[in-house]
Image (cartoon, rainbow, N blue to C red):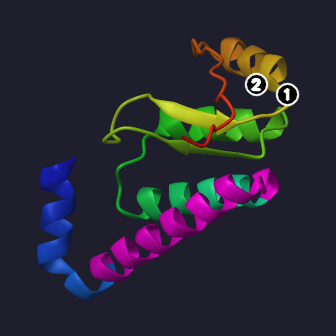
Amino acid sequence: MVTQVARQLERRPQVVERTFDGIDTLAKKAVDAIEDGRLYELGQLMDLNHALLASLLVSTERLEQACNAARKAGALGAKLTGGGGGGCAIALAPGKVEQVLEAWKSIGIEGFAAHIAERTTP
């Protein structure tokens, strides 16, 4: 995937650089959304980030299926995770975890739930 994106950067540097800038901006906004507890916004940012990553051709049909199934099951957002090109996705699904896991299972995807603990101030 890294080589593939590097080739795109060589062929279309302005387009790929704008995509990188967009991903960076979304990541910064996601930090703010997390810190402020704005989960709906965070879900939207995840979806936008996934779209930008897909535009770099690092998503796969299976990842698209996973993200779409999660959203249809009630996830606030979903995106590929890791380097792309594989089958690893993450979904933000407060109150809909079981529905998302069942949706994934129905299309042959094994998933698990992870919970983020409240942040404590040192």
Residue 42: which quarter of the image? bottom right
Q: Residues within 10 Å of mark 2 (few under 14, many from 20)?
A: many
Residue 92 placement, left or right of 7: right
Residue type for callout 1 = Lys
Majority secondary structure in the magenta region: helix
The residue positioned 11% from the left and 76% from the top of the image is: 10
Up-down: is 12 above or below 56?
below
The residue positioned 49% from the left and 74% from the top of the image is: 25
Q: Is residue 8 magenta?
A: no
- SS class, disc 2: helix
Q: Position of residue 93 (x, y in %)?
A: 77, 34
Horizontal and vertical percent for residue 61? 49, 38
Q: Nearer the viewer, mark 1 or mark 2?
A: 1
Give the residue at the far front of this rendering.
122
From the viewer's side, name the closer residue of 67 and 25.
25
Res 96 label: 1
Task: Give how far apart the Cα atoms at labels 1 and 2 are.
Answer: 6 Å
Name the residue: 62% across, 21% down. Answer: 114
**Residue for point 63% across, 38% down:** 119
Numbered label attached to residue 56: none
Q: Quadrant location of the C terminus? A: top right
Amino acid tagged 2: Val
The magenta stretch is 16-40
Element type at marker 1? loop
Q: Which residue is mark 2?
A: 100
Q: Is residue 122 above or below residue 29?
A: above
Q: Are marks 1 and 2 in contact (CB under 8 Å)?
A: yes
Q: Residues within 10 Å of mark 1 (few under 14, many from 20)?
A: some
